[in-house]
Amino acid sequence: GVDVKKYSDPIDTKLILKFLDCPEDVFILKDEDKFFENKVYQHQVIRSINILKGTKEKKDWLPKLLKLTTHKNETIAQNALLAYTGLPSQLIPCEDFYLISEDTQKSNKIREAAFMAFTFGVQPSIYEKTHILVADILDPRWRTAVSRIGDIGDDFSLFYLKKFEETFSKKLPKDQLDIFNFTLKKLQNQSQLKLTKDCLYTILLNGAYMDLSCGPLENDFKAWLVEFLTKKSADEEIKKIMKQLYKEIDQNKDEIKAPFGNTNARIKLYLKPYAE
């Protein structure tokens, strides 16, 4: 193919990124408008946000991107929030974004974008908070939550969503039902795959955090887990994985300290009947 770089001027990244440091009042350029160099336009800021996602200079500009997530121009704020879905998960301020998503004074599109960004972070409560929203079909974050469960969900997610299947088939508007059914099908296909040690650990880690936090899905998870592990342990290969995980769990460095205990000890308790 043709190397277009030979025929185009290099992009001055810093020159473009300067628009991340924009004032509260920005202008929207319409086709018939005259462009003024002393004004900052919405499209310039959004272009800066998009360029930032692909640059190696992210860290220097991240404080400015974070500030834009609460900009009074909602299109800019929405784009800034969604930009975090393409950044390393450890850079996402999960609590801040979750609080924005909970703020009923914010518009629906801002709440939805904030929740989307939240779900891409590293925070032990993400799993449960995403699942909880399934029951509230009027919540503006519902579509995002159900879609993201298709990405971060597991066998428990399939069990949990199936509890709503009959009711939703009768009461959900078509656009929401399509999202729900797509995620359900995705989880069903995933459940047919062979259970790996990493997948089992993730299921138990999410469950242990819900359990030790006394979260709203604690009882649902514990009731489901016994049947799930009993069924899976009939497979000798999976039972071997359970024993291996049980022996290794004390050395696990990804342990999470929950309000009422630590996840390593709780996971070990879950696996004990099948590993000894």
Image (cartoon, rainbow, N blue to C red):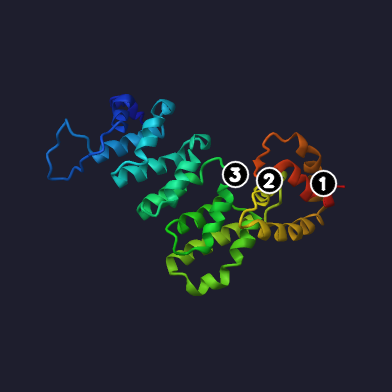
Toward the right, the furthest residue is 276
Q: Which residue is drawn at 80% across and 54% down?
A: 233
Would residue 8 appear left or right of 35 to someone viewing this image? Answer: right
Q: Which of marks 1 and 2 is nearer the N terminus?
A: 1
The reply to whether dot 2 and dot 3 touch (C-beta < 8 Å) is no
Amino acid type assigned to the residue bearing label 2 in the image? Phe
Residue 80, horizontal then vertical, whole percent: 37, 40
Amino acid type assigned to the residue bearing label 3 in the image? Pro
Mark 2 against mark 3, which lies toward the viewer?
A: 2
Q: In this view, does 226 lie above or below 125?
A: below
Residue 240 is labelled as 1
Count residues near mark 2 (Cα–Cα under 10 Å), then give few for <14, some for 14-19, many for 20+. few
Q: Residue at x 42, y 47 (%)?
A: 100
Residue 132, horizontal then vertical, whole percent: 55, 57
Count residues near mark 3 (Cα–Cα under 10 Å), then give few for <14, some for 14-19, many for 20+. some
Name the residue nearer the viewer: 18 or 74.
74
Would residue 86 appear left or right of 108 to someone viewing this image? Answer: right
Asked if residue 1 can be seen in this view, the reply is: no
Q: How many marks?
A: 3
Mark 1 against mark 3, which lies toward the viewer?
A: 3
Q: Earlier in the sequence, mark 2 or mark 3?
A: 3
Residue 271, horizontal then vertical, whole percent: 79, 49
In the picture of the structure, the residue carrying the numbered disc 2 is 260
In the picture of the structure, the residue carrying the numbered disc 3 is 124
Asked if residue 42 can be seen in this view, the reply is: yes
Toward the bottom, the furthest residue is 170
* Helix, strand or loop status at disc 2: loop
* Helix, strand or loop status at disc 1: helix
